[in-house]
Amino acid sequence: MLEFCTLGTGGTLPIPERALSSLYVRVNGRSLLIDCGEGTQVGIRRLGWGFRCLDGMLLTHYHGDHCTGIAGLLLSLEKAGKDEPFHIWGPRGLKRVVEGLCVIVPQLSFPVMLHELPAEGGDVEMIGLKIRAFPVDHGGIPCFGYRMVLDRGAVFDPEKAKALNVPMKDWKRLQQGETVHVGLKRILPGDVTGAPRKGITLVFSTDTRPCETLEKNCADADLLILEGMYGTEDKMPQALKNHHMLFREAAEIARKTTPGGLLLTHFSTSLEDPEEYLPETRTIFERTWAAKDGETVVMRYPEGKEKAWISLS
């Protein structure tokens, strides 16, 4: 199971009911953040999922609405008694940006480890997720989207274990990923499992125009979290100028890549009610929703080859 909360769904500037961009992702009690806009630590306190369980943060890019909450977040981690390393990944310029933002942060009780990813992106593993950073089109500014995969182990096959004469007392060890020996023969966990099972794939990408790398990494996902900066066609000049997307464009990406659902976020301050634009957007991709601050989503493993089960609350 994978859970996440849209802590902040605003773009550019906060408004009273909409904080700036941040996503809190949790797997088996461990957590990470994607982006840390102003107000992120307040959103975490409202959510109640905790600070100490946060292992790190992925930054999409360094516009203020995505990273100005970093200093306050680190102070909250300090006050929560964190002593394990906190890892931050992001595009080039990470060290300069984080150190600049954290001039006001005193000595911390835990190390902050900075990992600058190359322009073409790269792979990260954290909280049990396999994460791929991929570049998107934000007008020449280094900017990443993130594709997160929660793998699922294959089913243990007792008949295969019996055929290999594995004693029942060793079955649990194999199920836990250990290797056992039967006489002189070495038995691997893969020797006693069935076909691989489909895991959960979640894609998060804001601040981009539609582009090839985005479509490629959205393929076969269970859920897309994409920006819907503007709701109507008359905003296309702003979208082109500022390298953002309309609701329609995000929905067209979903239609092409066939995820289990599309959750729109990163709304312009000009959108008083993002849900106003959903009926028309759903004519392009039916399973589209507009995120709200503090909304939690549960994703469970799919059955067979279906998409993951998604529950919004």
Image: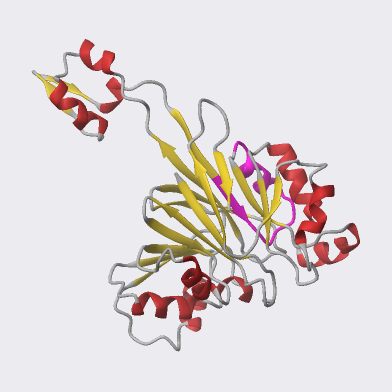
Q: Position of residue 195 (x, y in %)?
A: 41, 22
In the rendered image, residue 217 lying in the magenta stretch gets the answer yes
Indicate left or right for 36 with 187 as reference.
right
Above or below — where is 29 with respect to 95? above
Above or below — where is 157 with respect to 128? above
Indicate left or right for 47 with 224 as reference.
left
Q: Residue at x 37, y 28 (%)?
A: 154
Q: Position of residue 84 (x, y in %)?
A: 29, 67
Name the residue at the front extreme. Answer: 313
Q: Nearer the viewer, residue 112 or 299?
A: 299
Q: Nearer the viewer, residue 105 or 259?
A: 259
The answer to whether any part of residue 116 appears in the image is no
In the rendered image, residue 253 lying in the magenta stretch gets the answer no
> In the rendered image, which quarter is residue 152 located in?
top left
Indicate left or right for 206 with 88 as reference.
right
Q: How is the image coloured?
A: secondary structure
Name the residue at the right extreme. Answer: 234
- Tell me the magenta residue range: 202-220
**The N terminus appears in which quarter of the rendering?**
top left
Q: Position of residue 17 (x, y in %)?
A: 67, 73
Q: Residue at x 81, y 66 (%)?
A: 241
Numbered disc total:
0
Name the residue at the top extreme. Answer: 163
The answer to whether any part of residue 235 appears in the image is yes
Q: Position of residue 197 (x, y in %)?
A: 44, 28
Above or below — where is 66 with respect to 200? below
